[in-house]
Amino acid sequence: MANAFASALLPALSSTISFIFAFFVLRRWRYGRRLYTLFWGIGMLFYAIGGAMEALYGFFGWHPLVFRLWYLFGAILVAAWLGQGTVFLLVRKGWAYWLFYILLAASIFATYRVFVAELDPTQMIAGELSGHAIVTPGVRILTPFFNLYGVITLVGGAIYSAWIFWRKRVLLHRVVGNVLIAAGALMPAFGGAFQRFGVPYTLYLGELFGAILMFIGFMYATQMITMGIPATRQPA
């Protein structure tokens, strides 16, 4: 009973924190109208929805809609849309918009495939939400492409920001911000890996700490937290 409660309570806490963080990030976009804050806010909402579906599953058990929403937002879309925020921060607008159009089209296609997929909850492992419940071919193969885009843009953005700072000694806040965002977005993956090796609750703890790291990263990247040293501002 304690295990089942923890598997619901931890993602519920993570989701609540993520919704609060998303509110602040989107409020930042409302006043500044910077596209990177909009997409980071959307990505944070996706992160929160994924956690909320895990909590609902932990409290109430299997439901097809809960599973589909979890898989779409928590497994497929979240990293890519967070990464798109970093693209709008660091990449020229023309390229950033083209990448967004591709991501949007791919996301619509993924949404359709997830919602028409046949599900078999008996295929899930150890009573946890798992993509194994999708038995329709060609759906789960979409996930690595979205996650790869997310990893490349998030980690690549952190490396690029560090390179710019190393060359010009400017925009240190973006280095710290992008490193924290990338680390936070990858925390659930590391937590999930440990959980697969039998370490309990690491996935949910990874999601919780990941949300916190990403929000701190957002604050650094948008200069809501100052570094205590001069940092030349460049338009994004």
Image (cartoon, rainbow, N blue to C red):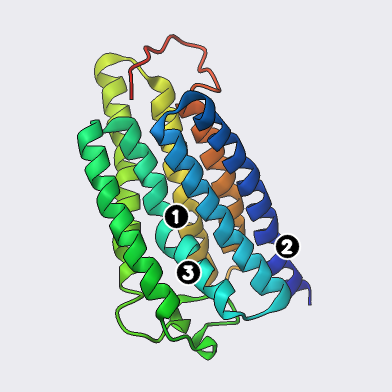
Secondary structure under the numbered disc 2 in the rendered image:
helix
Q: Quadrant of the N terminus?
A: bottom right
The answer to whether 215 appears left or right of 134 in the picture is: right
Label 1 vs label 2, nearer the camera: 1
Secondary structure under the numbered disc 3 in the rendered image:
helix
User: Residue 137, position in %: x, y?
Assistant: 31, 84
Q: Farthest residue toward the right? A: 1
Residue highlighted by disc 2: 9
Residue highlighted by disc 1: 78
Residue neighbourhood size for the residue with mark 1, other residues' Cα within 10 Å, grouped as few (<14), some (14–19), many (≥20): many
Which residue does the image show at 45% across and 38% down from the upper left? 38
Question: Camera-side residue: 178 or 120?
Answer: 120
The answer to whether 55 appears left or right of 111 in the picture is: right
Which residue does the image show at 52% across and 30% down from the upper left? 30
Amino acid type at mark 2: Leu
Which residue does the image show at 47% across and 48% down from the upper left? 43
Residue highlighted by disc 3: 71
The answer to whether 232 appears left or right of 99 in the picture is: right
Label 2 vs label 3, nearer the camera: 3
Q: Quadrant of the C terminus?
A: top left
Mark toward the start of the polypeptide (1 vs 3) = 3
Q: CA distance from mark 2 to mark 3?
A: 19 Å
